[in-house]
Image (cartoon, coloured by chain):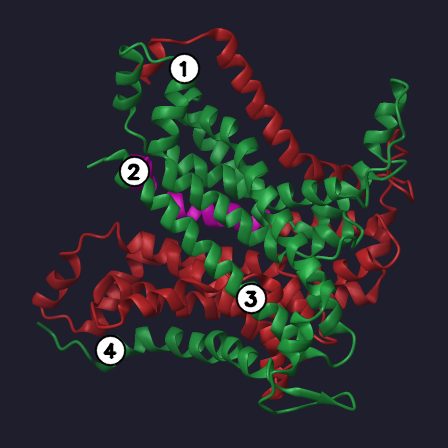
Chain colours: A red, B green
Amino acid sequence: MSSEAINRSRAVDWSLRAYIVLAYAFVFAPIAASFVFSLNSDRFPSIPLGHFSLEWYRAVASDPLVWQGLGNTLVIGLIVGVVSTLLGFGAAYTDYRYNFFGKQVYLALALLPPTIPVIIMGLAMLAFLSRVDLSGRAISVIIAHVVICAPFAMAIIRLRLSQMDPALEPAAWNLGASEWATMRHVIVPFTKPAIFGALFITMAVSFDEFAIAWFVSGLNETLPVKVLGFLQGQVSPRINAIGTFVFVISMTLVILAQVLLSGRTGPTAADKE
Amino acid sequence: MRPRLSIYGLTFSLPLLVWQLLFFVAPLAFLVALSFWTVKNFTMRPDFDAVNWITMYGKPVFWQAYATTFALAASASVLASVLAFPASYAIAFKLSDTARRWAVFLMVIPFFTSYLVRVYSWQIFLSDAGIVNVLLGYVGLGPYPMLNTVGATMVGYMTLSLPLVILLQLFSLVFIDRNLIEAAHNMRCGRVRTVFEVVIPSARVGLVIAALFCFILTFGDFVSPVYLGGGDPTTLSILITDTTKSGQQWPRAAVIALTMIGTLLAVAFFAVRFAYAGNAKGARK
C-alpha cells in the first residue's frame, strides 16, 4: 500500500475505480436483466418494462418436461457431486502423501479434463459411450460430468490438505494408529470442510453444464439442455425464469461451500492473502 | 518408512486413475480411431481409411471455418486481455484488502450462472427492439441491427471469458513485489512507464496464461456464434454440432475435433513458451 503515497493522481485513481464498476456492470448486466425480465409480463422482453408478473414462472412450473429435466438435473448433480468428491479426495490425498514414478502423468489426468473444450468432450463421449452401449441415459451424463468435476474436487481438497501440518499423520502412526484409523480420525475430520465444499461446488458445476449433457443425454435431458432447447425454439422469457431459479440453487450451493471453506479455516485462509 | 505400494494407498489413488483412463483417455483415443472409420449407407463401419481426413481437409468450407474460428478466438483473447487489464490492475493496486476480497467473490459468481441464460439475456439487450436500441432511440439514434453480427459474438465471448481473465490477471498482479513498483517510482519512472516496464513484465506469465484460457474457451464455444452471431460465419464448433447432430457423419466430426485439439495443444505450447521466455530476458532471480 505504501507505493500509493508517491506518484498518484486523483483523476487516474477515480477513473480506474470507475472502470472497475464498468467491468462489473458488463459482467452482471445479463445476470441482472435475466432476473428482472423473469418477473416482467412482456412476451418480447425490452424496455420500457411491462408490469410485474409471475406468468413465466407459472408457465415453467406447469411444463412437465421442465419438472422432468429438473428431476434429472438434481439426481445427476447429487450423484456426480458424491462420486467426484470421493475420486477427488483420493487423488488429492495421493498427491499429498505419495511420490511415485509417473506422478506428473497422474496429476495431468487428474486436472486436465476441464481444459478440453466441452464440445470435443461431448463428441468423444457420445461416440465412445454409444459404442459401449451407455449413451442416451442418465448414467452417461453422470459418467461425463464426473470426468470434468473430479478435478475441481481434487483441487479444493488438495488446497485444504496443504494447510495441514505434515507431522500430524506420522504423529498418529507413532502413537500406534493404523493408516486407516489415521485416515478416519485425523485426515477426514481435518479436510471435512473442503470435502463438503467440493461436494457443493461439483454439484453446482454439474447443474450448469449443458454441452456435454446435450450430446450424451438422449431423452434424459437435464434442465440446462432444456434451456438450450428453448433457445433453439422460439425465444421465450421462460428461459429467464428457469435461469433465475437455477441461479438461486447454484448460489446457495456456492455460498454454503464458501461458508464451509472459510468457516473453520478462516484465520489460515485470511493469513494467506 | 511404510511401503509405497499398499492396499491402503491404492484405495485412494486408483479410483480416479481408472475413471479418467476409462472415461477421459479412452473416449479421446476412440475419437482418433473413429476418424479413420468409414460411413456407408448411413452406418459407420470400423475401418482404417484416411478418407475422412482427405474429404474434410479438401473442403474450402472447413478451412474457412478454421480461419474464422482461429481469428475470432485470437481477437477475443487480445480484446479480453486489454479490457480486463485496467480492471485487474485497479483491483490489485487501488482497492483495500476487504474491497479486493469482495471483488474476487463477485467475479466468481458468473461461473455459477448459466452461460446459456446470460447469452439469451444479451439477445434481450442487442435485438432490433432490444434495450440498447430503445435507449439509442431516446437520443434519436438507430435502430442498429446488432444481433447476428460478429460484434454480438464478441460480446458473448467476453461474457464467457472476461471473469476468468480478470481473475487470472488479478492473481498474477497481487503477487508482484510492491517494492519493485516503489523502486520504479523512486527512480522517477512515470506511471504509464511503470505499468509497461515493471508491472506487465513481472506479471507476464499470468497475463499470457489468462489470454491462453480465453483462447481455449472461445475456440471451442458454439453458443455465442450460434445464438448471438446467428451461425454466420460458421465456426468449427458449429461445424462439429451440425456434422454430429445431423446424420451419421461422426468420423468427419472427429476429424474436426482432433484438428481443434491439435491446434489448442500447439497454441498452449507456444503460449507457455512465450510466457516463460520473458523470464529469462527479464533476468529475475
Residue in the foreground of this view, choosing between B182 and B5: B182
Chain ID, mark 2 = A
**Which SS class for mark 2?**
helix
Q: Specify whether residue A266 is painted magenta.
A: yes
Nearer the viewer's eye, disc 1 or disc 2? 1
Q: Is residue A250 left or right of residue A192?
A: right
Magenta stretch secondary structure, dominant: helix
Give the labeled residue for mark 4. Answer: B8
Could you tell me residue B144's position as x and y percent?
86, 32
Q: Which residues are magenta?
A: A251-273
Instruction: Tell me if I can see residue A222 in this picture.
Output: no
The label shown at residue A272 is 2
**Which SS class for mark 4?**
helix
Could you tell me residue B31's position as x and y percent?
56, 78
Give the labeled residue for mark 3. Answer: A78
Q: Is residue A202 left or right of residue B60?
A: left
The label shown at residue A198 is none
Q: What's the residue type where badge 4 is placed?
A: Tyr
- In the rendered structure, are the residues bearing label 4 and label 1 in contact, judged by CB atoms less than 8 Å apart? no
Q: Earlier in the sequence, mark 2 or mark 3?
A: 3
**Which SS class for mark 1?**
helix
Q: How far apart are labels 1 and 3 at the CA level?
A: 51 Å
User: Picture quarter containing residue B268?
Assistant: bottom left
Chain ID, mark 1 = B
